[in-house]
């Protein structure tokens, strides 16, 4: 079997890895192309003492670490949604840690094989992966604003948020307090009740905040009909209903639309939104 035939089955996976490493398919393909050109130019230098896949990735890393392959598209440009978020987080990880994380978690290489590919000791690979995971975890932590006028419930929510490693920017009990705190310290997530102190509305507070910031919001309320029907406290204008709300107390089945929506809120932090699901079914029923 020729060298080309041995390497062909591994090229789609190398392209996947190159895309994750560089941030774009075009940029990654440029390095894959440079790798193949180097192999074709000097086939005798291709590592024959290891598995062909290891040799291919080792050659790729030699090219990636030393060459400057120009491509029209900048890495990461044009990425949106989950892919854009993933690239943004990976880009903040140091290059060597990023390589170690992707090679072990995405490509399935062992620590020994990864050490061979990046020129490190196996124990160093484990440390690099741990550093990368810690950085990703740090990035997914959110600054949370709690809008809740019941002291006991607010303390319970704050405890849950802090236990998960997130930071509570403040606890607001009125609409004006909520807006003021959001302006002074913009949150990454808002947890809001509807009926607030001084007869103000959490709906209005969130509306004012969203007019100035783009931030995910979870309404935790015993009165979801106020969100779904547009019913407001007196002298408040109506607004369109949200796409989804979560009532208390209630337990959402794992495959229900509500459960799926909760898991997509909160900067992608699954631990936090899982606890948010628990909160929506465990918070005591509120009075009007």
Image (cartoon, helix red, strand yellow):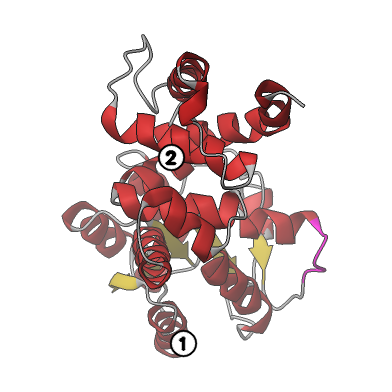
**Residue 109 vertical position relative to residue 75 in the rendered view, above or below:** below
Disc 1 is placed on an element classified as helix
Disc 2 is placed on an element classified as helix
Which residue, given by chain and number where applicable, does mark 2 sit on?
87
* Residue 174, image x, y percentages: 33, 67
Residue closest to the eye, 40 or 17: 40
* Residue 59, image x, y percentages: 45, 34
Residue closest to the eye, 49 or 241: 49
**Residue 41 vertical position relative to residue 6 in the rendered view, above or below:** above
Upstream in the sequence, badge 1 or badge 2? 2
| Picture quadrant where residue 61 is located | top left
**Residue 186 vertical position relative to residue 130 in the rendered view, above or below:** above
Judge whether residue 254 is colored magenta. yes
Of the 4 image quadrants, the one containing the C terminus is bottom right
Q: Farthest bottom residue?
A: 152
**Residue 227 vertical position relative to residue 62 in the rendered view, above or below:** below
Residue sitting at 37 percent across and 29 percent down? 63
Residue sitting at 67 percent across and 34 percent down? 10
Q: Farthest left residue?
A: 184
* Residue 223, image x, y percentages: 64, 67
């Amino acid at each position: 079997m020729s060298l080309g035939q041995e390497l062909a089955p591994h090229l789609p996976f190398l392209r996947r890895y190159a895309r994750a490493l560089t941030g774009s398919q075009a940029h990654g393909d440029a390095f894959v192309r440079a790798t193949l050109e180097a192999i074709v130019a000097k086939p005798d230098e291709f590592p024959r003492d290891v598995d062909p896949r290891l040799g291919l990735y080792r050659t790729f890393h030699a090219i990636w670490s030393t060459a400057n392959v120009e491509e029209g598209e900048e890495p990461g440009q044009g990425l949106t949604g989950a892919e854009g978020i993933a690239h943004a987080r990976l880009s903040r990880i140091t290059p060597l840690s990023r390589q170690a994380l992707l090679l072990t978690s995405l490509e399935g290489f062992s620590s020994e094989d990864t050490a061979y590919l990046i020129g490190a000791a196996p124990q160093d690979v484990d440390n690099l992966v741990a550093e990368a995971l810690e950085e990703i975890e740090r990035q997914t932590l959110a600054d949370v604003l709690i809008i809740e006028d019941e002291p006991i419930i607010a303390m319970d929510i704050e405890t849950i948020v802090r236990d998960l490693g997130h930071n509570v920017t403040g606890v607001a009990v009125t609409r004006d307090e909520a807006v003021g705190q959001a302006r002074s310290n913009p949150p990454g997530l808002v947890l809001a009740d509807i009926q607030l102190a001084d007869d103000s509305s959490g709906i209005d507070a969130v509306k004012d905040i969203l007019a100035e910031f783009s931030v995910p919001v979870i309404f935790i309320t015993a009165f979801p009909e106020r969100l779904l029907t547009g019913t407001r406290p007196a002298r408040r204008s109506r607004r369109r209903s949200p796409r989804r709300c979560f009532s208390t107390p209630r337990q959402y089945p794992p495959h229900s639309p509500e459960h799926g929506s909760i898991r997509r809120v909160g900067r992608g932090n699954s631990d936090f939104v899982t606890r948010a699901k628990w909160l929506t079914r465990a918070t005591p029923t509120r009075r009007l």
